[in-house]
């Protein structure tokens, strides 16, 4: 399956933005979804794991959810700050047919302007 | 503190084989909780999972790359490796090694800094 994200989103500081991640086949709820933030020149870091869990140190402005009706996951960032400007990737797992594959979405460039 | 570091040539000729090694320090590789993975990122593009291996040598490869990829692990040296053959102009990327959890969870972000690989004659 594939995970499809919008190529880019932009919003003003202080506002709220939501980034979607749509699974092409299979149930989005079947496998956990992780969200990574990547700043230029750096490796990705986790902002949401297991659909809606926040690692320690990640502000509660970051939240995650899944929606089975649209077969998608979402990352919501509220109270946007300029430091949130980065690329965001969703990632899930393909465990069909006794395999274990890590699947990444194509990434979304967040611009805070 | 767990640390990972990629090493290998930054330049590979077309049709040749890329060989990269990831050295792991600060913790043992011999836990059945983790997989050790390779992820690449072409310049200006997104992340692509290449494959994962556990400490016993069980491997899973991206189906789109499976025919070209071999991964191995040497726990005595705290290293795991990637070989990708038939390199082409589509393969230049930053190649990252990382410790990965299967199926979900979070136990910290442990990625190497990445190594830029160029394909050119």
Image (cartoon, rainbow, N blue to C red):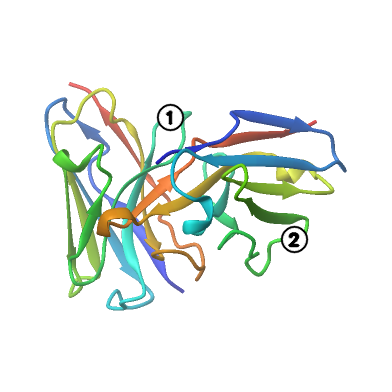
At 48% from the left and 28% from the top, the residue drawn is B44
Which image quadrant for residue A59? bottom right
Query: Judging from the image, what secondary structure is the residue with disc 1 in?
Result: loop
Q: Quadrant of the C terminus of chain B?
A: top left
Is disc 1 surrounded by few (<14), some (14 to 19) or many (20+) residues within 10 Å?
few
Chain letter of disc 1? B
Disc number placed over residue B43 in the picture, else none: 1
Give the side of residue A65 with respect to residue A1, left or right: right
Residue highlighted by disc 2:
A59
| Residue B120 in view | yes
Give the side of residue A3 with respect to residue A1, left or right: right
Residue closest to the eye, A52 or A27: A27
Residue closest to the eye, B71 or B114: B71
Q: Is residue B65 above or below residue B21?
A: above
Q: CA distance from mark 1 to mark 2?
A: 29 Å
Is disc 2 surrounded by few (<14), some (14 to 19) or many (20+) residues within 10 Å?
few
Image coords of residue B76 (percent x, y)? 17, 75
Image coords of residue B31 (percent x, y)? 31, 78
Residue closest to the eye, A45 or A10: A10
At 36% from the left and 75% from the top, the residue drawn is B33
At 29% from the left and 62% from the top, the residue drawn is B23
At 14% from the left and 39% from the top, the residue drawn is B67
Q: Are marks 1 and 2 on the same chain?
A: no
Chain letter of disc 2? A
Foreground label between 1 and 2: 2
Q: Is residue A29 above or below residue B48?
A: below
Image coords of residue A65 (percent x, y)? 66, 54
Query: Judging from the image, what secondary structure is the residue with disc 2 in?
Result: loop
Residue most toward the right?
Answer: A14
Image coords of residue A60 (percent x, y)? 76, 61
């Amino acid at each position: 399956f594939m995970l499809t994200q919008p190529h880019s989103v932009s919003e003003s500081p202080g506002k709220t933005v939501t980034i979607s991640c749509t699974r092409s086949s299979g149930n989005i709820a079947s496998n956990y979804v992780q969200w990574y933030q990547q700043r230029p020149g750096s490796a990705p870091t986790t902002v949401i794991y297991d659909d809606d869990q926040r690692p320690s140190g990640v502000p509660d402005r970051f939240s995650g959810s899944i929606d089975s009706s649209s077969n998608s996951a979402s990352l919501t960032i509220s109270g946007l700050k300029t430091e949130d400007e980065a690329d965001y990737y969703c990632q899930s797992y393909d465990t069909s047919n006794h395999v274990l594959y890590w699947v990444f979405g194509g990434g979304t460039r967040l611009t805070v302007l | 503190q767990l640390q990972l570091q990629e090493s290998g040539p930054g330049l590979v000729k077309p049709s040749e084989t890329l060989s990269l090694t990831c050295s792991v320090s600060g913790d043992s590789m011999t836990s059945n909780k983790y997989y050790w993975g390779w992820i690449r990122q072409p310049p200006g593009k997104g992340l692509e999972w290449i494959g994962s291996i556990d400490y016993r040598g069980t491997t899973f490869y991206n189906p789109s790359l499976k025919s070209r990829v071999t991964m191995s692990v040497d726990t005595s040296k705290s290293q795991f490796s990637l070989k990708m053959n038939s390199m082409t102009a589509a393969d230049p990327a930053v190649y990252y090694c990382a410790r990965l959890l299967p199926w979900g969870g979070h136990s910290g972000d442990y990625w190497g800094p990445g190594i830029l690989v160029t394909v050119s004659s």
